[in-house]
Amino acid sequence: ARRLDVPDEKALSAIQACLPLKHRMNLIKVHGIKVLDDSYNASPKSMEAALEVLFDLGKGSRKVAVLGDMLELGAFERQAHLELGSLCVQRHVDILVAVGSNAGIVAEGAKRAGMPSSNIFVTPDAYGAAELLGALVKDGDVILLKGSRKVGLDTVASLFLDMTKAESQEGR
């Protein structure tokens, strides 16, 4: 902006007006819970970056990571998912919900790195993840949703938000 002689105030205003693309680092706040919806896609590097954001955003809060498969990794698939589980422990994730065909491998990596089994949940699909979230999540939690498109974690965001809306309407 400065190279184009755009005043700082105008540049800042333009940046603040930008909205993230759907399912790409969208922060949704509902009933004292923060949901970081980054469910558009996933690779080892993007998972690492998203867990770093969860770590920073979740300081002082319980951190819940709902992580789906990373696809198209070839021979590196098993190792990448084991490392993802370990990375959850390094980034101080409190609750791990692993989703998809590699969920057991992510859980194994987290257990090996020291996460208690009682804090690890494995489910084959997005619907199971949404149900688990409904039962696990408390006010003040920060939730990360991240996985390859095929896993469908974008539906977890929608289902979870629908469940919390229904709960809030029942409480009226």
Image (cartoon, helix red, strand yellow):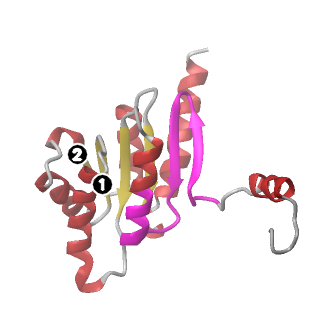
Mark sitting on residue 120: 2
Is 43 contained in the magenta span? yes
Q: Nearer the viewer, residue 67 or 124?
A: 67
- Amino acid bearing label 2: Ile
Q: Residue at image x 26%, y 53%?
A: 90
Query: Can you tell which quarter of the image residue 92 is in?
Result: top left
Residue lying at the far top of the rendered structure: 172
Does residue 72 appear in this view? yes
Q: Earlier in the sequence, mark 1 or mark 2?
A: 1
Q: Which residues are magenta?
A: 22-50
Q: Residue at image x 52%, y 38%?
A: 34
- Amino acid bearing label 1: Ala
Q: Quadrant of the N terminus?
A: bottom right
Residue 149 placement (x, y as % from top left): 48, 68
Instruction: Write down the residue under mark 1.
Output: 98
User: Mark 2 packing: few (<14 Cα in 10 Å), some, or many (20+)?
Assistant: many
User: Mark 1 packing: few (<14 Cα in 10 Å), some, or many (20+)?
Assistant: many
Looking at the image, residue 159 sits to the left or right of residue 14; the answer is: left
Give above or below for 36 relative to 62: below
Give above or below for 36 relative to 22: above
